[in-house]
Amino acid sequence: GAVVSQHPSWVICKSGTSVKIECRSLDFQATTMFWYRQFPKQSLMLMATSNEGSKATYEQGVEKDKFLINHASLTLSTLTVTSAHPEDSSFYICSARPTSGSFYEQYFGPGTRLTVT
Amino acid sequence: QKEVEQNSGPLSVPEGAIASLNCTYSDRVSQSFFWYRQYSGKSPELIMSIYSNGDKEDGRFTAQLNKASQYVSLLIRDSQPSDSATYLCAVNIDLLANAGGTSYGKLTFGQGTILTVHP
């Protein structure tokens, strides 16, 4: 149980274009999902907290107009990187917290590797 | 002071030995503690969670929590080369909850300890 999927697993796009990444909880409902970014040899950096049916909460320094998050259902959250630039190239990982779970365990998706050329 | 601190390592142990990974945290009201394993190029995988003081065992893994000392550790017995990975300590530090607001379960991660188990 507790499986989270992400799509696509990798994407290459041109500078200035937008890219949408989907995060789905496959066998549980998740009121809250999280989006992280990880650069090579660095730890996870939380970008935003996504709650179903409400606006996402962004961490300090993360541009909300550049990283659009939508959490339209209890099993799906999307991250759209708008007007992507090479410095946005990174490993984007989502996680989901089961609605029925306690103590805040999070289950991670496999990640999406974004390369902006 | 960082909120969650780990020795970045690398920690190298021989196959069959016990690997000991340590983590300290700064927030006294933290209630939930997790260990994740991350293989190179992959996303983190939850391997242990612990919520109360003492030891929790699951197979070859034992998590130890000491809230008074703000310390959580992970022991891996009979280490195998397949255990070679980065181990991330995560703590629920939620300022909103601490201020009486709604907690969304945000986790704060340490920088990770690289473990290498050599044959």
Image: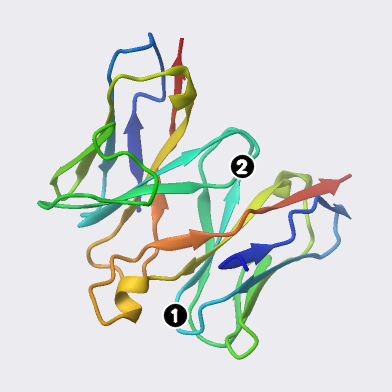
The residue lying at 29 percent from left, 68 percent from top is A101
Mark 1 highlights which residue?
A: B31
Give the SS element for disc 2: loop
The residue lying at 30 percent from left, 80 percent from top is B99
Residue furthest bottom as drawn: B68
The residue lying at 44 percent from left, 71 percent from top is B93
| B102 relative to B84 in the view: left or right | left
* Total labels drawn: 2
Judge by depth and name the residue closer to the eye, B24 or B19: B24
User: Could you tell me residue B35's position as x and y percent?
Assistant: 57, 62
- What is the three-letter code of the residue carrying label 2? Gln
Other residues around mark 1 within 10 Å, as few (<14) / some (14–19) / many (≥20) = some
Does any portion of residue A102 appear in the rendered image?
no
Mark 2 highlights which residue?
A: A42
CA separation, marks 1 and 2?
Answer: 26 Å
Vertical relation: A1 (above or below) B119: below
Vertical relation: A91 (above or below) A116: below
